[in-house]
Amino acid sequence: MNAKTDTSLPAIARLLGRLDGRMLFWLLVLAGVLLALSDFAYHRHEIFDFEAVPLFYAGFAAASVLVLVLAGGIFRALFKRGENFYAPFSTDSEPPLKAQERDHA
Amino acid sequence: MLSAILAHAPALQTVVPLIAAPLCVLFGRRHLAWAITLAASLISALFAAYLLAQTLDGSVISYELGGWAPPLGIEYRIDAVNAFVLFIVASVGALVALYARESIEQEIDPALHVYFYTAFLLCLTGLLGVTITGDAFNVFVFLEISSLSTYTLVALGAGRDQRALTAAYNYLIMGTIGATFFVIGIGFLYMLTGTLNMADLAERIAALGDNRTLRIAFVFIFVGIGLKLAMFPLHLWLPNAYSYAPSVVSVFLAATATKVAVYVMLRFLFTVFGFDYGFQAATLQTIVVPLAVIAMFASSIVAIFQSDLKRMLAYSSVAQIGYILLGISLLNKPGLTAGIIHLFNHAVIKGALFMAVGAFVYRIGSSRIEDLRGIGKQMPWMAAAFVAAGLGLIGVPLTAGFISKWYLIQATLDEGAWWLALLIVGSSLLAVIYVWRVVEAMYLAAPVQDAPVKKAPWSMIVPTWIMVLASLYFGINTELTGKAASTAADLLIQATQIEKAPETVPGAPAAGE
Amino acid sequence: MPDIFPPALIFIAAAIVLPVLPKGNLRALFLLAVPLVAAHEIWQLSEGVTHTYELLGYSLTLMRVDQLSIVFGLIFSFAAFLALLYAWHVKDTVQQVTTLLYAGSAIGAVFAGDFVTLFIFWEGTAVASVFLIWARGTEGAYYTGMRYLIIQIASGVILVAGMALHYHETGSLAFGALTLGSLGTWAILIAFGIKAAFPLLHTWLPDAYPAATPTGTVVLSIFTTKLAIYSLARSFAGTEILIYIGTVMVFWPLIYAAAENDLRRVLAYALNNQLGFMVIAVGIGTPLALNGVAAHAVAHILYKSLLFMAMGAVLYRTGTAKASGLGGLYRSMPITALLCIVGGLAMSTPLFAGFVSKSLILSSVAKAYEPLIWAALLFGSAGIFYVAGVRLPYLAFFGEDKFAGAPERPKEAPWNMLLAMGLTAASCFALGLMPATFMSFLPYDVAYDAYTPDHILTQLQVLSFTAIAFFALWRFGLIKRPAPGILVDSDWLNRRLALAIVKLGAYISRNMWGLMSRTATRRLDAFLASIYRAHGPQGPLARSWPAGSMVLWIAVLLGFTLILSFSQSL
């Protein structure tokens, strides 16, 4: 069932459900592009030389995420183990708390 | 009247329990025997407190037994060193006497109670006598009195566990060898100097200078006493003796017997032999320091793996003796002070711990850690006492154990041996583990059975908590212990010509003020 | 002003009184009042030494008040208030008491004027906080708590050792600036470093925080690490090595945070990364940088609490905080979702506290002219926003609806959690809106304006392109919802390798010892056995061979001592 029509959900949730993810993404891209283009219109006071490169911040941020995602993927490939790796009953492997237990916690 | 009695306080110190001992047998009634024991031990505790107060300023009391002047007659010689030990022994003795009545109900056949009290009083006499006397051969005599009665006391544990007999037998062999070595050493000294009075011995030895006979005498006395004080690896008799003896005997032995042996070691090393010769320092630094460090670690690790609480505490005692010996063999004033303070603090702490264990044995008939699960809720007073004293054993700040370790670490740093300081801290972490195991069982594990365990009787709770509160009190107020120990250390150092350590211990709290 | 009651003791006194009060609203109100009273007291403090006491002949300083300690004292009290409001529904006395003791110890440590007092409160935070992990009540939480406790206690022990060495060297116990060099100061640095989660000393943090109760993790996230940052700022400001340590802290945990499945562990790693920012600034050590440390500690406590609160609410309502079991949760917990997004934005978006404090730190590094460190921080800023501001809310609240087929949808978080989150978000916002007021609390009087067009534009570029990169990579399938499983960190070294080495060592020494003692005792046994045969029945005596080995030891020791004493020249 669609979130915006499911009346069992809270009103705010239905409101959020109305938002179009794809449109939001393109709005974000538009805002990003405008911000990036401001590099050419506005002269910053750089401290380091490399800051002056146009699109430095935008590119650095995007590259950072890419690096991080790749590094994370490599780490996951290398270091991922089962949830019982250290002990048969670790907090990672325990079943979800039951409702009444949760109310005590 | 009072002053006339007090003038003979040194003699009465040993005579009161000595006379009380046969009285117990003569009357033959166990409740009466208990009353006599309690009265005698309280009186000698009062005398000990009086003697300590007299000598705390560094003065020396010399008492000629029977009016025979030394060196021919036997002299009782009390200074801050042995007054402090007397005080420890006698006050622990009084608390133990109070505690004993209920405790032995469960563990010793009622028909044997009278003999228990007799042996206990004789043991007390022996320990007090060893401490108070100024005569080397007299030390041996009293040592034998205390040892023989201790063998009996340990063997009385056979009512609960037959292995007490083997333990007592082993202890007898070991103790006898130790005493024999000791008397051989005394023999050599006598051969060399023709005297047995300690003060006199010291003078003549100094006059004679270094020689082979002296060295042999030293080695025999050193090993003999090393056995008595359970110096690693001569401690093998101790775990069995402490674990199979009746609980109350474990309390008494753990708190006093090894401490008295340490005192004898101090007295001979410093006062009699006078520490003028390289071979003594070499012995201490080449043999005792490594052995003490090994004891601190090896015994603590062994303690971690014990399943029986008494046995665990026994091994912990061997480790703690390591700290005391380490302090002494640093051969400086802070080290001696630390050793003597730990002598006292460990007596109080270990006494409290064994008392708590005795109460567990009294109620649930076992001292196995797995049988103590959930005891924290069932016997809250005793469990809390165990935890409080256990913190002291670890050396948590604001407990007596911390004071000991603080002094000890200061002393090692004074010698520039920071690695020793690190080892002390490291071995304390081991104590955390073995104490924690018990705390975990007592408080966090589910109880063994649902059957309610009754609280310990008040006559056990009160002495235990007196010990626990003492261990906390002496962790906060170090005036008495600090002063007594530093006065004692001063006296011992003065008796020798080892290089004077800096007079003030940096950071020694309140010492000598 | 001696009539001020030390704020730490307010908490401790309240913790003693609390168990007597009846459970329910009265007790909850009392709990909320405690940190407010303490904050009020701290507000009124004037600078200087206000309380001293005697211990073991040392005169010690219970209360040393300056602007640095006031900032930390205030934020600790206020954050304790928010966390207690968040935990309004918790009826467990143990958690309530230990929360108070924990907060009280942390505040006591902040005002401590000497190392002894610091140590007492330092261990107080260790012992009190572990109960928040144990309160989870599961076997895994118990062992995690033990590991946590051992490391925390060890930190205190190392602190005491360092303190003793330092005292021995300098004769001073004052908790003030130190210069690295001696063994003592290194030990103190390591003690601080354990609590500040330095690289390789950090594993307790991602291990323990996700194991605590939903409310407990919020409390944990506030105090211990920031206390360590405070201590570093107090004692090691301007110590160069901290810059490099901090840089590693920016990178390493971030990669784990980017790969981790348990979202509360993601936050723990993110927290570790943010500690790196503060450690770098402490290493820079200029007044501007130290202002940055204090400001960032304040902002970071607030927004990280908010994020932990949101994830705690998710755990509380759904029973899990793992990305593999979550998704589409905005449908049932929309307010929590929005507040979580606000928490993510509060980390570095203009108008929020995190923007101001992060700009301060970045500027201080730029002013010190450290281009590589500065670039690392920029990477950290982008990375933290990706990890905790975009990836985390997306995984929890958006994407595939994991609760579509469930018989009952999870409920929205209870009112007190929402209120606590709302207040936290509002405070982030308020501090970001009033930078001048925020700055006036900081320890040094340095003029600084975060809201320059440069800062705002560059920061918005970083944030927008981080978000764009995330969504683009998600669409291309390069970022996926993680599968269940844990990531092994350097804790493998102590939980697996060290354990294996100890086991191997124990095995070898057991066998070696067995071999040695068998050989020795076999000879001895043969000797003794011949005696026993000659002397009668074997039964009881045969068992007494240990006596023989004792005698052997005596002989060995006697011989050795004799040789030694004879080897000395006469």
Image: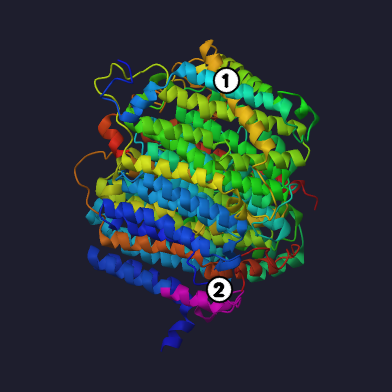
Against C106, is C56 above or below? below
Chain of residue at mark 1: A
Report the side of C225 relative to B374 (left or right).
right
Same chain for marks 1 and 2?
A: no
Name the residue located 25 percent from the left edge and 51 percent from the top edge: B106
Residue type indicated by callout 1: Val
Judging from the image, the colouring scheme is: rainbow
Q: Assign the N terminus of chain C to one quadrant of the image.
A: bottom right
Residue nearest the viewer, comparing B345 with B234 = B345
Name the residue located 72 percent from the left edge and 33 percent from the top edge: C373
Q: Few, some or many C-alpha atoms within 10 Å of disc 2 (few <14, some 14-19, many ≥20)?
A: many
Residue at the farthest top position: C476
Distance from disc 1 to disc 2, alpha carbons, whole Å, reads 93 Å
Residue range highlighted in magenta: B46-73
Report the side of C529 relative to B438 (left or right).
right
The residue that disc 2 covers is B78
The residue that disc 1 covers is A29
Residue C512 coordinates in the image, percent (x, y): 57, 25
Residue B242 coordinates in the image, percent (x, y): 41, 48
